[in-house]
Image (cartoon, rainbow, N blue to C red):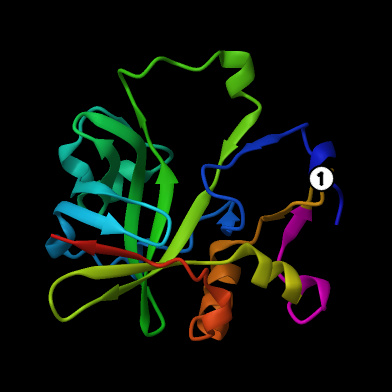
Amino acid sequence: MKKVSIILGFTFLIIFLSGCLTTLHPIFTEKDLAYDPKLIGTWKTENQDNKGQVVITNLASESSVELPGNISSIKQKGYFISYQNGPGETSKRYIAFLARIGKHLYFDYYPADRKEDEKIDEFFGAHLVKMHTSYRVEILNDGSFELSQLDESYVTKLIDEKKIRISHETDADDNTVITASTQELQQYLLKYGDEPSAYRSDKTIFKK
C-alpha cells in the first residue's frame, strides 16, 4: 500500500483514544439500521478509566447539527450523542447510527459539528478528514447497555500476518488507516464479531 502521507497530503482528524479502530467509511447502509427509541435519554457511564454522563437524543430533533453527505434523509433513525464531564461541560459530540450486522448490534460514531460552533480555518480544515468509530452494543436485561470498541491492534496484527485482506493505508508514522468499503467492513464484522480479542477490554456501561 502507498503511504497515506502522499495521498493529497491528508492529515487525518481522528477523535479517539490510541488503539481504537477508526475507518474512513461507515459500517452500515440504510437497510442495516435498527433504531431503538429506548436508547434516548440521559445515561450515567463508567469504564475502567472514567465516569461521566451521556445525553442521547434523536438526530432529527437537533436542528443545530451539521449533517454530512446524505445523512438528512435518514436522520429520523439517527442519534445525537453528547458526552459531558460535568453540568454544562460537553466534551465530545457525535452523530451515531445503530445497525444490525449479522447477529450483533453496532453503533457507528461520527464526530458532530454544531452550526453555531466557531468554524475551523478553511485552509486548515481542508486537510482534515473525520473518521468513523464502531462499537458492538449489548442491551442488557435491566435496560442498561454496554459498548465494546473495536481494537485497532487486532486488525493490524491480522494484516501483518496476512490473515485478512482489507483495504488500508499506512502513514509515515506507521499508523494504519482502514479505508475499506462498507461491504468490506461488514464482512470483517461477520467473521470476527464473536472474537473477544477483536475488541478493547475497557467496555463502557450505560445506566439510567
Q: Tell me which residue sits at (54%, 85%) in the image.
A: 195
Q: Give the residue type that dot 1 points to.
A: Asp
In this view of the protein, which residue sits in the foreground, 53 or 173?
Answer: 53
Residue 118 in the image: state x and y as whole percent. Answer: 40, 14
Q: Eyeballing the image, is 59 above or below 47?
A: above
What is the quadrant of the N terminus in the image?
bottom right
Task: Say which quarter of the image contains residue 162.
Answer: bottom right
Is 178 positioned to the left or the right of 134 in the image?
Answer: right
Q: Is residue 204 magenta?
A: no
Is 93 positioned to the left or the right of 166 in the image?
Answer: left
What is the quadrant of the C terminus in the image?
bottom left
Count of numbered circles in the view: 1
Q: Eyeballing the image, is 28 above or below 64?
A: below
Residue 20 in the image: state x and y as whole percent. Answer: 56, 58
Task: Say which quarter of the image contains residue 187.
Answer: bottom right
Instruction: Give the SS element for disc 1.
Output: loop
> Overall secondary structure of the magenta stretch?
loop
Instruction: Quickly name the residue at label 1.
Output: 173
Is 67 positioned to the left or the right of 166 in the image?
Answer: left
Question: Badge 1 local density, few (<14 within 10 Å), some, or many (20+)?
Answer: few
In this view of the protein, which residue sits in the foreground, 104 or 69?
Answer: 104
Q: Magenta stretch: give its range.
A: 159-169
Residue 135 in the image: state x and y as whole percent. Answer: 42, 65
Residue 176 in the image: state x and y as whole percent. Answer: 73, 55
